[in-house]
Amino acid sequence: VGEPHKWGHQVGHSWRTGRDVFAVWDEHTARKVLRLPGFLQSIMTAIEQQATYSEYIRPGGYNDPDMLVVGLDGMTPYGIVDECPSHLPAGSCKQGDYISRELWGKVGGLTYTEQRTQFGFWCMLASPLMLGNDP
């Protein structure tokens, strides 16, 4: 079942090639500043990862690094954390706790230039251009 980039063209037109993208440009901000859960990745990490899959793109078959997160002023993460988000009150969580969207609140967001750049990269990567409008 793994490695859909190798067989996905036989059963569909696109396949996911990575973790969920979050509206944050770089991995340092995702991990050290926002302390996002591991299933979320930065835009740059998603872009860099696509080099691994470039040989599998073909007419009617496309690698999907996840949705475009353009037009969002931030997103509301959730999940099990390795480190508690710094904006939460001290002692309100510990490693391994599940943090809900309501508790976490809206964070992140791309600048206008970063949004245009993500859109451009998705075009160059022949990725599906689907908007992820769920903040």
Image (cartoon, grey):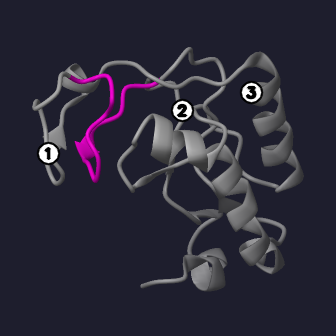
Residue closer to the observer: 59 or 24:
24
How many residues crowd around disc 3 within 10 Å: few (fewer than 14), some, or many (20 or more)? many
Q: Amino acid at mark 1?
A: Lys
Q: Is residue 19 left or right of residue 26?
A: left
- Number of numbered labels in the structure image: 3
| Percent coordinates x, y for residue 36 in the rendering | 40, 43
| Percent coordinates x, y for residue 72 in the rendering | 57, 18
Q: Residue at x 13, y 37 (%)?
A: 93
| Percent coordinates x, y for residue 86 in the rendering | 33, 30
Residue closer to the observer: 20 or 12:
20
Q: Is residue 57 left or right of residue 46?
A: right
Whether residue 62 is visible, yes or no, is no
The reply to whether dot 3 and dot 2 touch (C-beta < 8 Å) is no
Residue closer to the observer: 71 or 36:
36
The quadrant holding residue 23 is top right
Label 3 to label 2, Cα distance in Å?
Answer: 12 Å
Q: Which residues are magenta?
A: 75-88
Is 76 magenta? The answer is: yes
Question: Marks 3 and 1: which is nearer the front?
Answer: 1
Position above or below: 9 against 14: below
The residue to which callout 2 is attached is: 132
Per the picture, the main secondary structure of the magenta-coloured stretch is loop
Q: Amino acid at mark 3?
A: Gln
Label 1 to label 2, Cα distance in Å?
Answer: 30 Å
Precedes in sequence: disc 3 or disc 1: 1
Numbered disc 3: secondary structure: helix
The residue to which callout 1 is attached is: 94
Position above or below: 5 against 112: below
| Percent coordinates x, y for residue 22 in the rendering | 52, 39
Whether residue 38 is visible, yes or no, is yes
